Image: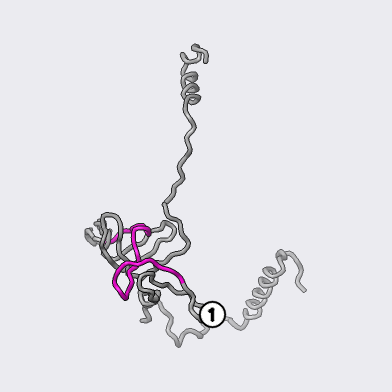
Amino acid sequence: MNSALLTSGWGRKLAKKLMKTPTKKLKNNNGLKTNRWNIVTGDVVRVMEGPQEGQQGKVLDVIRLQNRIIIDGVNLRKRSIKPTADGTPGKMVTKPVSIHYSNVMLVDPTTGEPTKISRRFLEDGSKVRVSKKSGQIIPKPDPLLSRVPRNIIAGPYDTAPEDVFEVTFDDYELYLPHIYETKRVNNYISDSGHDDDDELD
């Protein structure tokens, strides 16, 4: 390269770019990628690697997009909650954070030891998880047991059952044909793909 080019600012920048060796950009890879999840919410697992090795707990949540799980009482971190405008003071709480899926193993409920899992089909065609150590079937926990039931107590903004069918709209009978005509027109347009200006039969 001509030495005169290196004396100018743009020449030095060009030389630096030409001397750089091309490097490949590393993709963001979380390691293990799997579509066969043997661990679901409610299972009991044991940590096999990392600072929490040997700890055991129940799976609270499964984050499949990140290949991570949250275990009750494992990998605890302190988090601060800021005070709110209504006067509630701030405080420090301890809660579990996620751990990678590859660092844990499912605990066999019959032996209490961590085990690998194989999948088998029963005679009725249902797929089950089978422990490789004991050969026993490990049933999946019922997801409905961990759900919080809905509140069935009527609040001040809920409609009472006896008021559900009460008509409070004035001249309801007068506008009733127009209501059903609008529904018929909208259904016709959505089914046929016609515009509003098209004539209806």
Can the viewer see residue 137?
Answer: yes
Direction from residue 91 to residue 64 in the image, left or right: right
Region in magenta: 95-119
Q: Residues within 10 Å of mark 1 (few under 14, many from 20)?
A: few
Q: Residue 62's x, y, as percent?
A: 39, 64
Tally the marks: 1
Q: Residue furthest top?
A: 4
Q: Residue at x 48, y 62 (%)?
A: 35
Callout 1 secondary element:
loop
Q: Residue 59's x, y, as percent?
A: 34, 67
Q: Residue at x 37, y 58 (%)?
A: 102
Q: Residue at x 52, y 15 (%)?
A: 1
Q: Is residue 115 magenta?
A: yes
Residue bearing mark 1: 169
Direction from residue 70 to residue 159 in the image, left or right: right
Q: Residue 9's x, y, as percent?
A: 46, 18
Please tell me which residue lies in front, 140 or 200.
Answer: 140
Q: Is residue 169 above or below residue 196?
A: below
Please tell me which residue lies in front, 43 or 188.
Answer: 43
Q: Residue at x 36, y 65 (%)?
A: 61
Task: Give the residue type at disc 1.
Answer: Phe
Instruction: Tell me where residue 77 sits by quadrant.
Output: bottom left
Can the viewer see residue 156?
Answer: no
Q: Residue 108's x, y, as percent?
A: 33, 71
Q: Quadrant of the C terminus?
A: bottom right
Q: Is residue 102 magenta?
A: yes
Q: Specify the color scheme.
A: one colour
Q: Residue furthest bottom?
A: 162
Q: Is residue 111 above or below residue 87?
A: below
